[in-house]
Each structure stands twice: as C-alpha cells, then as structure tokens.
C-alpha cells in the first residue's frame, strides 16, 4: 500500500448530489487546482482572488448557484492531503 500523503481530491457536490467540480492535488509537488469538469472548462489554480472569501459555482444540472467559504474548503482539502490513507472526500456546497 503506497503512502498517499501529499495528494488528495475533494469532490464538490450541490445539495442534490450533482457533481460541481473537484479541488485536487495529484502529486505532492503540484499546486492545488480546481477542475470544473470536462464539459465545463479547463482546470485552473485554486483558490484564485475571485474565490475569496467564498467559492461560488453553478450546478449545471440544477442551474442553481452554490457556494462555500473558501477557507473551510481549504481546511478540508489540507486535512485530506495530510491523511496518508484517504485520498478522496466529498463536500456538499449549499445553495446560495
Ligand atoms: Zn445540482
């Protein structure tokens, strides 16, 4: 079993459990990126200035905006990165 410390994927969902992207770090030396999904657009570094203090996006299936405090998402992702056994977690973003 490989040591998974240093990597982690936080899957983001709307309250109806539709995927709205992922916050991920795929290698210890890489920066954190936001992947909105293949159809939604390219990956980008995260968090950006526009993501402060809240990260907002729109669920493509509900058509409704969702948002969460950026620091809360960063904390969860950081804990996941430090966890050597878990690499994937899901975070639900409330409707705005
Ligand atoms: Zn949705």
Image (cartoon, rainbow, N blue to C red):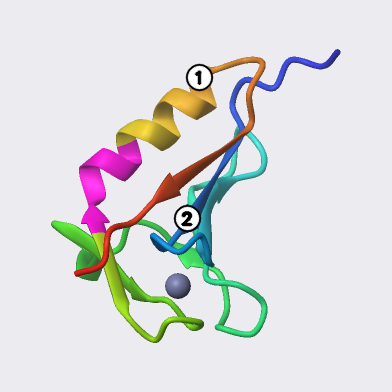
Q: Mark 2 or mark 1: which comes first in sequence?
A: 2
Instruction: Specify whether tag 1 is near ligand 1 (CB below 8 Å).
Output: no
43 w.r.t. 53: above or below = below
Number of labels in the image equals 2
Which one is nearer the viewer's eye here, 43 or 55? 55
Residue 51 placement (x, y as % from top left): 24, 64
Q: Is residue 12 magenta?
A: no
Please determine whether, in this image, residue 15 is positioned above or below residue 42.
Answer: above
Instruction: Depth check: give the residue in front, 24 or 92.
Output: 92
Quarter of the N terminus within the rendering: top right
- Range covered by the magenta-colored residues: 68-74
Query: Where 31 falls versus 93 (above or below)?
Result: above
Q: Who's the residue at 55% across and 17% down the image? A: 83
**The quarter of the displayed image where residue 78 is located:** top left
Quarter of the image where the C terminus is located: bottom left
| Residue under pointer 2 | 12
Q: Residue at x 43, y 36 (%)?
A: 77
Residue that mark 1 sits on: 82
Density class for disc 1 (Cα within 10 Å; few <14, some 14-19, many ≥20) is: some
The reply to whether callout 2 and callout 1 are in contact (CB within 8 Å) is no
Q: Give the percent coordinates (x, y) of residue 63.
A: 39, 86
Residue that appears at 50% across and 19% down: 82
Q: Position of residue 54 (x, y in %)?
A: 18, 59
Give residue 26's quadrant in the image: top right
Location of residue 35 with respect to 91 vertically, above or below: below
What secondary structure is marked by label 1? helix
Disc 2 residue: CB within 8 Å of ligand 1: no
Q: Which mark is residue 31?
A: none
How dense is the environment of label 2, judged by Cα within 10 Å: few (below 14), some, or many (20 and up)?
Answer: many
Dominant secondary structure of the residues highlighted in magenta in the image: helix
Q: Is residue 95 left or right of residue 78?
A: left
- Local secondary structure at mark 2: strand
């Amino acid at each position: 079993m490989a040591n998974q410390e240093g990597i982690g994927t936080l899957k983001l969902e709307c309250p109806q459990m539709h995927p709205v992207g992922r916050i991920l770090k795929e290698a210890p030396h890489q920066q954190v990126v936001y992947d909105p999904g293949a159809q939604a657009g390219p990956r980008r570094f995260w968090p950006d200035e526009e993501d402060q203090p809240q990260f907002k996006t729109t669920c493509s299936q509900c058509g409704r905006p969702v948002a969460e405090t950026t620091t809360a998402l960063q904390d969860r992702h950081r804990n996941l990165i430090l966890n050597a056994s878990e690499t994937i977690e899901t975070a639900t973003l409330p409707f705005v």
